[in-house]
Image: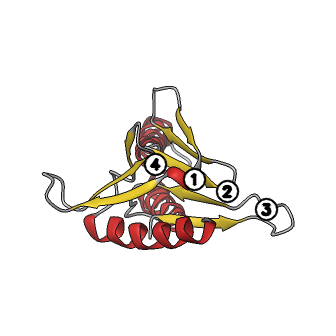
């Protein structure tokens, strides 16, 4: 699941923190393998020109290819993310988008209602509302993941009341 709860110590009574991120088809361990295998396979033809002047003509292009792949994959990891801090005192939702300042919504968790809209153009549209403002939550997740998140978050909100 592209979200994770981190419970804090019970003696602090500071609740839990939810981190949400878009689904990434290549995890960090896979990233290391892709870069390693690419560098290895690009090095094989270089063995034929090892010790010649031709190596210096081909080596920069091989290094540039590995660097470009590394930069492209790392850039794809810089997607949107959300962090929801949930405690008895406050619910704080922080949305981070690349190239934008973080947007923060703070409210009392007692008044927050969670809604899963099925008659919306977006399937399983998930929102939080405090009666004054409605905030979209986890727009980058799949409909099935939003339903699972709704059930999980609903349980946690009810436990706070």
SS under mark 3: loop
**In this rendering, which labeled residue sits more in front, label 2 or label 1?**
1
What residue is pinned by disc 4? Answer: 77
Location of residue 30 in the rendering, given as x and y in whole percent from the top left corner: 48, 67
Who comes first in sequence, dot 1 or dot 4?
4
Earlier residue among tags 4 and 3: 3
Residue 91's tag is none
User: Which of the two discs, 1 and 3, sits closer to the camera?
Assistant: 1
- The label number, if any, that marks residue 13 in the structure image: 3
- Rounded to the nearest angstrom, the CA distance separating label 4 from label 3 is 33 Å
SS at circle 4: loop
Q: CA distance from mark 1 to mark 3?
A: 14 Å
Q: Residue 50 at x, y = what percent?
A: 53, 52
Mark 2 sits on what residue?
87
Within 10 Å of disc 3 (Cα), the crowding (few <14, some 14-19, many 20+) is few
Crowding at dot 1, Cα within 10 Å, few <14 / some 14-19 / many 20+, comes out as many
Q: Between marks 1 and 4, how big is the CA–CA gap?
A: 31 Å
């Amino acid at each position: 699941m592209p979200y994770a709860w981190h419970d804090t110590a019970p003696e602090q009574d500071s609740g839990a923190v939810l981190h949400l991120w878009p689904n990434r088809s290549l995890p960090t361990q896979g990233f290391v393998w892709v870069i390693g295998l690419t560098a290895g396979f690009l090095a094989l033809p270089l063995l034929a020109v090892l010790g010649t002047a031709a190596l210096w003509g081909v080596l920069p292009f091989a290094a540039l290819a590995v660097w470009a792949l590394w930069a492209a994959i790392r850039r794809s990891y810089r997607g949107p993310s959300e962090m929801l801090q949930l405690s008895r005192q406050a619910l704080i939702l922080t949305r981070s988008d690349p190239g934008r300042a973080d947007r923060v919504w703070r409210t009392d968790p007692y008044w927050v209602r969670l809604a899963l809209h099925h008659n919306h153009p977006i399937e399983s549209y998930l929102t939080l509302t405090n009666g004054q403002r409605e905030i979209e939550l986890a727009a980058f997740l799949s409909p099935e993941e939003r339903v699972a998140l709704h059930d999980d978050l609903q349980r946690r909100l009810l436990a706070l009341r």
